[in-house]
Amino acid sequence: MLNELIKLKNQAFKEIKKSGALKELKKLETKYLGRKGEMTNILRQVKDLAVKERPKVGQLANQIKEELQQVIKNIEFELQQKESGVKESATVDVTLPGDRPCLGHLHPNTIIQQQLEDVFARMGFLVLEGPEVESEYYNFEALNIPATHPARDIQDTFYLTKPGLVMRTQTSNQQVRAIEKYGAPLRAIFPGRCFRNEATDVSHETTFYQLEGLMIGKDISIANLVAVMKTLLKEVFKREVKVRLRPGYFPFVEPGFELDINCLICEGKGCGVCKQTGWVELLPCGLVHPKVLESGGLDPKEWSGFAFGLGLTRLVMMKYGIDDIRLLQSGDLRFLNQF
């Protein structure tokens, strides 16, 4: 048996070293080391040997098997280099310029959000973050949205399996949290992601970005709101932007308005983004409802304020002329590499 192993070893080494291609090498590996290979057949005969001979034969067989595996591995590497066109004598010219690594960059949502944060910071506003998984209390009840209000319809809100928790539908969830923590007077913005069970189209998406703003002080009026909004839009678009206020109902403000901007995609002529109206709904706004102030522990007879919910994603679309909101969350590098 020992002589058979040595003979098999010499024969295998001779054939393997003559291999000129990877396919040929793989066939030889199967021939000698495969499940039905010659080495396996010999090892199966060890059980029939005398007890004293088994250790010697087994030890030599394992040693030969390891040597064959190592030789095959070395020759496989050499053949791979040869077939890929890399020669052993190839050298690296260190004076040649290297390959520039592919670097990431900011998403357009992040670019505009950072610009807005900078504008508001210069106007004395705090920049605060809040939870995306929110309690029904801060997302609805503290904002004067009772359980019977349509905004709490299960078709619009993502409810979690744990009772009382939702994916926040608006960054307004931070209003009462901020009042409770900082009191009044207060100037703060709350940027971040929101989630609604929307029917997606060119101007609606299930995941989108908002920037909530809140100012509380003495004798705050609509004039303060309009002045802040015009300053904001002028800073973002680097030009005057035509705006309009329409009456609107929002439970957490009274009176409430819709602030629209002239569509910058079509310059007010009418397109798919503005639904052929020439105007794009940018943000709901108004004076903070007395019940919201009370939820935060403030006396509405002493304090007043305004609040707004800026459609950050829609502002991005206006800034860069993007005509389909779904592109922003698509992860399509052909789109994102333009920024």
Image: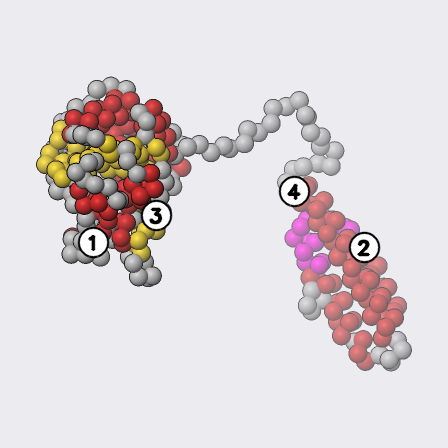
Q: Quadrant of residue 115?
A: top left
In the image shown, does 183 or 308 lie closer to the viewer?
A: 183
In the image shown, does 245 or 57 lie closer to the viewer?
A: 245
- The residue tagged with tag 4: helix, strand or loop? helix
Disc 4 vs disc 3: which is toward the camera? 3
Characterize the magenta stretch by its predominant secondary structure.
helix
Disc 3 vs disc 2: which is toward the camera? 3
- Residue appearing at x 85%, y 75% in the figure: 54
Which quadrant holds the C terminus? top left
Q: Is residue 270 visible?
A: no
What number is the disc on residue 152?
1
Q: Which residues are magenta?
A: 15-29
Residue 69, percent from left and from top:
75, 57
Disc 4 vs disc 1: which is toward the camera? 1
Circles 4 and 2, Cβ within 8 Å, touching? The answer is no
Q: Quadrant of residue 234?
A: top left
Q: Earlier in the sequence, mark 3 or mark 2?
A: 2
Does residue 28 show up magenta in the picture? yes
Q: Is residue 77 above or below residue 230?
A: below
- The amino acid marked with disc number 1 is Arg
The residue indicated by pointer 4 is 83
Mark 4 crowd level (few <14, some 14–19, many ≥20, 10 Å Cα): few
Mark 2 crowd level (few <14, some 14–19, many ≥20, 10 Å Cα): few
The residue indicated by pointer 3 is 132
Q: Is residue 225 left or right of residue 331?
A: left
- The amino acid marked with disc number 3 is Glu
- The amino acid marked with disc number 4 is Glu
- The amino acid marked with disc number 2 is Lys
The residue indicated by pointer 2 is 14
